[in-house]
Image (cartoon, rainbow, N blue to C red):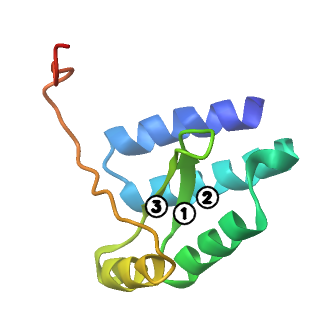
């Protein structure tokens, strides 16, 4: 757990410095550590998808969310994005594009 915490600090620093490739490497380390920590974090299918993503150019990634409703987040250099998208969509996975917002929290819906 301490190593995962340190990876979180390193990701924060890499993000602040704009070192996106390093963030991908750190996410990969985080994922491998998390899998060693608990056997039920992954499955054969998830491991296969992760390996396919790496074979398609992803530097690293992790699962975000829990209980079967989460998603993968990968860092992929620009030249590999199309290959990654094709590989994952070929497995029936949907892409959810991610962007950064520098304006802080916003009210999306007031129910």
Q: Image quarter for residue 104? A: top left
On-image quarter of the N terminus: top right
Does the CB distance between marks 3 and 1 fall below 8 Å? Answer: yes
Relative to 82, does residue 5 appear above or below in the rendering? above
How far across and down, in percent of the image, does residue 4 sit?
A: 69, 37
Residue at the disc numbered 1: 60
Residue 69 visible in the displayed image: yes
Label 3 residue SS: strand
Label 2 residue SS: helix
The residue at the point 47 percent across, 74 percent down is 92
Left of 104 or right of it: where is 15? right
Residue at the disc numbered 3: 74
Relative to 70, does residue 76 appear above or below in the rendering? below
Left of 42 or right of it: where is 70? left
Q: Which mark is residue 28?
A: 2
Left of 59 or right of it: where is 30? right
Which sits earlier in the primary sequence, circle 3 or circle 2?
2
How far across and down, in percent of the image, does residue 64 sit?
A: 52, 44
Please tell me whether mark 3 or mark 2 is closer to you in this view.
Answer: 3
């Amino acid at each position: 757990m301490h190593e995962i915490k340190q990876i979180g600090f390193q990701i924060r620093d890499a993000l602040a410095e704009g070192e996106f490739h390093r963030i991908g490497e750190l996410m990969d380390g985080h994922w491998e550590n998390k899998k060693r920590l608990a056997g039920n974090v992954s499955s054969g299918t998830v491991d296969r998808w992760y390996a396919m993503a790496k074979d398609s150019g992803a530097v690293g990634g992790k699962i975000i969310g829990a209980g079967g409703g989460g998603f993968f987040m990968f860092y992929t250099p620009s030249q590999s994005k199309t290959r990654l998208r094709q590989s994952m969509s070929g497995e029936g996975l949907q892409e959810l594009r991610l962007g950064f917002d520098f304006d802080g929290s916003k009210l999306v819906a007031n129910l």
